[in-house]
């Protein structure tokens, strides 16, 4: 257990007074929701049919994790907010997702490198939270861990294929690593215990892919505190407009 | 609200003894909308059927986090029970312990294979559901639904879904 403010696993059952737990659940839910929304954009646009289906399935897994976490957060919070309220009626400043997941899809290499960094982090996170004293969270984590490992296998194989591919695919993969590396330290903000395992998960794959980590130490953060890059507002505007325009609308 | 408090309900409260075994049978007969040869009982997602406060409470555990069939299954359970005469039904989703493909019954395995879907055995032991040949080739790790991968038989050439061991 990392014992950090984001690990969301205090001893005993979480109580409504425990704002930290709700915030942590929301942060992890936001990560998954935002990435699901990003990946959904690839549907019908992926480089091949199988990949189209894969990205759709992965997006659904992330969406499912987000839904379970929002529902759980709403129940603990006790204010009656539903998963829809939490996903569709919070503003940009209330979202606590990491900056990595809100970065634009870019080309396929960007999408895969972003997924790869995030999947490895999710494997570390869920492997920790399966031992949570909060049994509902532990159940969500148990489910999500298997899925995250499967996602990581998928994104790793693509990172290797693109990185160790043609001259052009290698160049694009390296550009993606260079562009996205600055969002990786934020993954461990408040959860430093996950960084070593994460590093271990990614380094062999990067080696096999002939990709190198940028030397520039510059790192960005702020997402966990609601300070986002310019991209999140646009994503939320598109995702939330229906509920914003027609509050309470049901499908 | 307690049923006995509803207008006109008092006179029938004596008949409200709910047949749990029958309710379970009805719930267990609901099929997966994506794989209609499998009942939710075969799939192992039906965890419990009980009566609480004159209400049938059905507990299910989702397969994959994002399985879009879960909501459909929830409403199919309510519908099936209501049309079998159980007026008050609640479907509860329980996340822990998490579902695993090990919960699919042996009968479920046979039904899947007969339907043309390779059941969830370790990937190296998968047999072609058409000709039973070994060593099919994995085409895609994600298939037509979250729970399946796509394979092709290296002997008869038939492409088929493999229900992932998960």
Image (spheres, coloured by chain):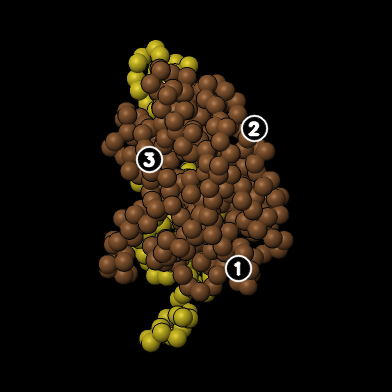
Chain colours: A brown, B yellow
Query: Of A209 and B153, which appears nearest the observer?
Result: A209
Vertical arrangement, residue A124 with respect to residue B9, above or below: above
Tell me the SS state at disc 2.
helix
As displayed, is residue B63 above or below residue B158?
below
Residue A37: x %, y % from top left: 38, 49
Of callouts 1 and 2, which one flags the residue occurring earlier in the amino acid sequence?
A: 1
Residue behind mark 3: A105
Query: In whole angstroms, how far apart are the C-alphas of marks 3 and 1?
Result: 33 Å
Residue at x 42% of width, y 35% of height: A110
Badge 1 element = helix
Give the mark nearer the N terminus: 3 vs 1: 1
Residue A113 percent coordinates (x, y)? 47, 34
Q: CA distance from mark 1 to mark 2?
A: 32 Å
Q: Chain of mark 3?
A: A
Q: Give the residue at x 38% y 40%.
A: A105
Q: Residue furthest top?
A: B155
Mark seen at residue A19:
1
Q: Tag on residue A218?
A: none
Q: Do tag 3 and tag 2 residues touch (Cβ < 8 Å)?
A: no
Classify 10 Å Cα crowding around label 3: few (below 14), some (14-19), many (20 and above). some
Name the residue at 31% across, 70% down: A247
Label whose residue precedes the other's in the sequence (3 or 2): 3
Distance between the alpha carbons at the discs numbered 3 and 2: 25 Å
When the figure is inspected, residue A150 is found, relative to residue A193, above or below; the finding is above
Q: Position of residue B93 (x, y in %)?
A: 50, 58
Quadrant of residue A172 within the rendered picture: top left
Query: Is B137 placed left or right of A213 in the picture?
Result: left
Image quadrant for the C terminus of chain A? bottom left
Name the quadrant containing residue A10: bottom right
Q: Chain of mark 2?
A: A
**Residue receiving disc 2:** A200
């Amino acid at each position: 257990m990392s014992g950090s403010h984001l690990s969301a696993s205090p001893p005993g059952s979480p109580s409504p007074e425990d704002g930290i737990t709700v915030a942590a659940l929301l942060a992890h839910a936001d990560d998954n929701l935002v990435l699901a929304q990003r990946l959904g954009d690839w549907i019908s646009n992926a480089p091949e049919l199988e990949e189209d289906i894969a990205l759709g399935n992965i997006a659904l897994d992330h969406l499912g994790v987000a839904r379970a976490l929002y529902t759980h957060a709403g129940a603990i919070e006790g204010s009656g907010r539903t998963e829809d309220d939490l996903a569709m009626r919070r503003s940009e400043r209330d979202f606590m997702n990491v900056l990595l997941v809100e970065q634009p899809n870019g080309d396929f290499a960007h999408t895969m490198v972003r997924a790869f960094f995030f999947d490895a982090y999710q494997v570390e996170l869920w492997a920790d939270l399966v031992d949570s004293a909060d049994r509902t969270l532990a159940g969500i984590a148990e489910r999500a861990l298997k899925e995250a490992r499967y996602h990581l296998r998928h994104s790793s194989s693509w990172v290797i294929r693109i990185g160790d591919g043609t001259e052009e695919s290698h160049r694009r993969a390296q550009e993606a690593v260079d562009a996205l590396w600055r969002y990786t330290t934020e993954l461990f903000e408040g959860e430093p215990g996950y960084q070593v395992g994460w590093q271990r998960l990614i380094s062999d794959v990067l080696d096999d892919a002939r990709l190198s980590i940028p030397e520039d130490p510059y790192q960005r953060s702020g997402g966990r505190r609601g300070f986002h890059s310019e991209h999140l507002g646009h994503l939320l505007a598109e995702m939330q407009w229906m509920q914003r325009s027609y509050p309470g609308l049901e499908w | 609200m307690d049923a006995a408090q509803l207008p006109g309900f008092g006179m029938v409260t004596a008949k409200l003894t709910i047949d749990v075994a029958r309710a379970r049978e009805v719930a267990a007969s609901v099929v997966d909308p994506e794989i209609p040869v499998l009942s939710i009982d075969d799939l192992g997602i039906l965890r419990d059927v009980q009566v609480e406060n004159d209400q049938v409470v059905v507990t299910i555990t989702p397969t994959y986090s994002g399985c879009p069939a879960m909501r459909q299954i929830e409403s199919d359970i309510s519908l099936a029970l209501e049309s079998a005469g159980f007026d008050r039904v609640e479907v509860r989703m329980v996340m822990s312990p998490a579902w695993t493909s090990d919960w699919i019954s042996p009968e479920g395995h046979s039904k899947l294979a007969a339907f043309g879907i390779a059941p969830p055995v370790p990937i190296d032991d998968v047999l072609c559901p058409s000709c039973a040949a070994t060593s099919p080739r994995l085409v895609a790790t994600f298939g037509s639904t979250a729970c399946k991968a796509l394979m092709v038989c290296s002997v008869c050439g038939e492409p088929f879904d493999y229900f992932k061991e998960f």
